[in-house]
Image: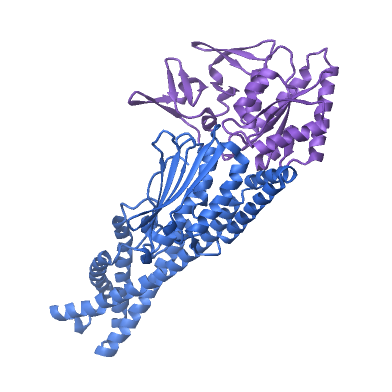
């Protein structure tokens, strides 16, 4: 938990219609590139048939012209797309979906299609002339006719085919991204459960419970009830989408009561929840990792212990949730954590609220020191 | 045989009280002379009271049980008093359990089961008895055995450095700030690193620097064949050492090439300095 103050970066999947990349994906992309080439020859043949049918030109000459132009149009357009995408996303963060995207966006793509089909029409036409010994069929003579032919035999099909390829690949990309997201969600859920049912915490709590059963049965019973509530909430957290803020605070109270018993005088917990905010919905145990971090990285390493405060407040149209400790602070915290807790909170916020939610972590500047984690969420519309 | 003394270090008050109560019940002759809440207090009390047995919780604030054991072994006076028998207490730790098994150090799991604790008591009693019967040779073999166990424990992957078992890329240069400048100190220029509170002193032939990285975090970033840890707070470049002389207490005095500083390697690391 070293100092990372900042806002949430939104994982954007929609910006990468050609999928997220690694070497395997790259190989697959290459395969798809050549498949598109083959298909475009097929489309060229179709256009050739259409032209023969419409104009009564010599069948095989038209076909060769049409296929040559089609394949070269594809070649120039598809080849132009990659450097254009690179240029377009030249400022994207390395590793982000944007940086891996092979799609330059429609405005740039339109330019590429126009230039590509012009080039394809010219070079393809020349190639066909060299192959067949016939210059462009009769209907292409004269500059106006030539322009019309260019537009209808190359530009329009190129646009349609580009759109067709784009939407197919966008769907494939979305599917891959959705699968990836699903897999990640499952992994995260498992890791979350593992981190919350941390064996060290569990066994130490049970050790305390074992002692209390002998010395102070009523307190042992109270502790067992808190442990049960904590376990139930942890196991249920992934199953419900939200619970009231009041319930969130109650679960944190259970958890911190367990910790207070274990740490004795070294831990004091305080809660502030204004009554008018108590009913607001919150994803279950959203604050739990922050409270755990405060204990694990802030107060546990500190010999004299300290205070942890959990507060909810309202700031204009935002709900502000704060977890503050008077622990060793960000600079002195051992950076052994995998930062899983923070990442997990950020991911949940991004999924649920997009850019409208933020998590920040900062050192406390008052004499008590320590660390403060702040979450800002949009208030539901009904409370505005 | 005089009444044995024991020290308990456990940060959770209820568990500390309970361990004391269980020990008093299972081993009435054992006198608990101190029951402390953190590692630094354990070291201080152990060195002052010289108990025969020390119960150390692994996870404690400030200084872990393992670090406390190392400090006790290194700073234990060399006047012949035997090192205490160390029993580690832990709730759960994937690395610790493996390491304990390997190094044959005694340990107790939390929640503490009375039967298991009774076994531990019997084992410690046997060890103390063996020790007192061989008073002639000042427990040399017993001391070496204890040191060997600790060495193994400290070298266990993932345990001493808090669970970071993955090898990390090694540092080629130490970046030290002096005023508003950053000095780039080639790693080969460093004679030794010495822990100083939250800082580490970096000593070269010409001068010394202070860096704000704990020695514990720095050690995994150093090439261990080149930089030897010779004390819990001291890492020296092996080829900068000119001579190593062992004294009666088992410590090793090091002189350096091209530098007047004299360093002392603790008993735990004395085995590094032997003739080929």
- Asked whether residue A183 appears in the rendered view, the answer is yes
Where is residue B237 drawn, in percent x and y? Answer: 53, 21
* Image: B50 above or below A382: above
At x 59% / y 39%, what residue is drawn?
B163
Residue A356 appears in which quarter of the rendering? bottom left
Q: How is the image coloured?
A: by chain
Assign the C terminus of chain B to one quadrant of the image. Answer: top right
Is A143 on the left-hand or right-hand side of B178?
A: left
* Image: B43 above or below A295: above
At x 40% / y 60%, what residue is drawn?
A353
Is A247 on the left-hand or right-hand side of A174?
A: right
Question: Which chain identifier belongs to the blue chain?
Answer: A
Between B180 and B36, the one lying in front of the other is B36
Where is residue A294 drawn, in percent x and y? Answer: 51, 43
Where is residue A370 drawn, in percent x and y? Answer: 45, 37
* Image: B37 above or below B129: below
- Asked whether residue A20 appears in the rendered view, the answer is no
Between B223 and A382, the one lying in front of the other is A382
Picture colour for chain B: purple
Residue A263 appears in which quarter of the rendering? top right
């Amino acid at each position: 938990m070293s100092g990372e103050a900042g806002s949430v970066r939104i994982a954007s999947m929609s910006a990468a219609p050609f999928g997220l990349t690694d070497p395997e994906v790259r190989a697959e992309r290459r395969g798809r590139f050549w498949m598109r080439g083959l298909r475009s020859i097929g489309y060229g043949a179709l256009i050739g048939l259409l032209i023969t049918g419409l104009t009564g030109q010599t069948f095989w000459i038209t076909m060769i012209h049409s296929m040559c132009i089609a394949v070269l149009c594809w070649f120039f357009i598809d080849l132009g797309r990659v450097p254009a995408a690179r240029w377009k996303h030249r400022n994207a963060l390395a590793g982000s979906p944007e940086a891996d995207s092979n799609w330059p966006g429609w405005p740039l793509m339109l330019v590429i299609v126009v230039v590509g089909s012009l080039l394809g029409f010219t070079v393809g036409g020349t190639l066909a002339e060299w192959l067949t010994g016939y210059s462009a069929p009769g209907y292409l003579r004269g500059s106006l006719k030539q322009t019309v032919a260019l537009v209808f035999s190359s530009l329009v099909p190129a646009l349609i085919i580009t759109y067709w390829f784009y939407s197919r690949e966008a769907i494939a990309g979305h599917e891959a991204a959705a699968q990836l997201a699903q897999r990640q969600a499952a992994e995260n859920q498992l890791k979350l459960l593992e981190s919350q049912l941390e064996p060290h915490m569990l066994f130490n709590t049970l050790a305390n419970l074992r002692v209390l059963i002998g010395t102070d049965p009523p307190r042992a019973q109270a502790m067992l009830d808190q442990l049960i509530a904590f376990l139930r909430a942890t196991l249920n957290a992934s199953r419900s989408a939200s619970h009231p803020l009041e319930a969130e605070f109650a679960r944190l109270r259970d958890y911190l009561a367990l910790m207070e018993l274990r740490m004795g005088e070294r831990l004091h917990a305080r809660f502030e929840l204004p009554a008018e905010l108590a009913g607001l919905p919150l994803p279950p145990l959203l604050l739990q990792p922050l409270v755990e971090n405060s204990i694990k990285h802030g107060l546990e390493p500190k010999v004299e212990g300290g205070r942890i405060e959990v507060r909810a407040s309202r700031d204009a149209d935002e709900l502000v949730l704060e977890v503050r400790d008077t622990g060793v602070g960000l600079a002195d915290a051992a950076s052994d954590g995998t930062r899983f807790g923070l990442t997990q909170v950020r991911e949940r916020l991004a999924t649920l609220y997009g850019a409208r939610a933020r998590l920040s972590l900062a050192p406390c500047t008052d004499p008590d020191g320590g660390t403060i984690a702040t979450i800002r969420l949009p208030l539901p519309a009904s409370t505005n | 045989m005089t009444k044995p003394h024991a020290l308990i270090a456990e940060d959770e008050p209820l568990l500390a009280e309970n361990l004391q109560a269980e020990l008093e019940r299972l081993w009435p002759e054992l006198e608990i002379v101190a029951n402390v809440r953190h590692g630094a207090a354990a070291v201080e009390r152990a060195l002052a009271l010289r108990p025969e047995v020390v119960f150390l919780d692994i996870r404690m604030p400030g200084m872990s049980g393992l670090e406390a054991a190392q400090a006790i072994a290194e700073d234990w006076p060399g006047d012949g008093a035997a090192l205490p028998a160390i029993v580690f207490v832990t709730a759960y730790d994937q690395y610790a359990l493996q390491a304990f098994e390997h190094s044959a150090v005694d340990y107790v799991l939390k929640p503490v089961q009375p039967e298991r604790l009774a076994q531990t008591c019997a084992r410690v009693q046997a060890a103390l008895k063996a020790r007192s019967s061989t008073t002639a040779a000042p427990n040399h073999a017993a001391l070496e055995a204890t040191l060997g166990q600790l060495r193994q424990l400290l070298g266990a992957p993932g345990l001493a450095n808090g669970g970071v078992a993955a090898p990390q890329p090694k540092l080629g240069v130490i970046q030290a700030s002096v005023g508003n400048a950053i000095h780039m100190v080639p790693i080969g220029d460093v004679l030794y690193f010495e822990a100083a509170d939250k800082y580490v002193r970096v000593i070269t032939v010409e001068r010394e620097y202070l860096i704000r990285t704990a020695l514990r975090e720095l050690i995994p970033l150093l090439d261990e064949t080149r930089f030897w840890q010779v004390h819990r707070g001291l890492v020296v470049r092996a080829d900068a050492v000119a001579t190593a002389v062992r004294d009666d207490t088992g410590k090793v005095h090091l002189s350096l090439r091209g530098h007047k500083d004299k360093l002392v390697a603790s008993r735990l690391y004395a085995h590094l300095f032997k003739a080929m």
